[in-house]
Amino acid sequence: MNILFVLHGFPPEVRGGGTERSVEALTRAMVERGHRVTVLCGSLEVGSVDTVVETDYAGIRVLRVHRDDL
């Protein structure tokens, strides 16, 4: 199954909050069960307006949207 999570931040860039920790645990468990998981989140890094950077975090596809107004 393909699963998408959308939230404001995600590890390893953001580690502190409850939302990030909860979604990280859920995504890891879903990947272990064979699901394809993507996280769409914001980024703390300044970049060109609406730049999207794709990375892999522990088998989880992460799409980070960069902004220039931080």
Image: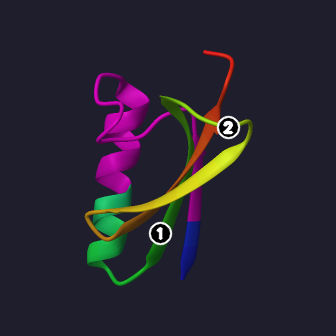
Q: Which residues are magenta?
A: 4-26
Q: Amino acid at mark 1?
A: Val
For residue 48, the mark is: 2
Q: Reply above or below: 43 against 70.
A: below
Residue found 29% across the figure and 41% down from its top? 12
Q: Which residue is mark 1?
A: 37
- Coordinates of residue 6 in the picture (x, y in percent): 61, 47
Whichever of callouts 2 and 1 sits on the residue coming sooner in the sequence is: 1
Q: Quadrant of residue 17?
A: top left
The residue carrying pointer 2 sits among few (fewer than 14), some (14 to 19) or many (20 or more) residues within 10 Å by Cα, namely few
Task: Give the residue at the far right of this rendering.
Answer: 49
Q: Reply above or below: 56 against 14.
A: below
Mark 1 lies on a secondary structure that is strand
Residue found 48% across the figure and 34% down from its top? 9
Image quadrant where one finds the N terminus: bottom right
Image quadrant where one finds the C terminus: top right
Residue nearest the observer in this picture, 1 or 37: 37
**Numbered label tally:** 2
Real-space CA distance between mark 2 and mark 1, rounded to the nearest whole angstrom: 26 Å
The residue carrying pointer 1 sits among few (fewer than 14), some (14 to 19) or many (20 or more) residues within 10 Å by Cα, namely some
Task: Give the residue at the far top of this rendering.
Answer: 70
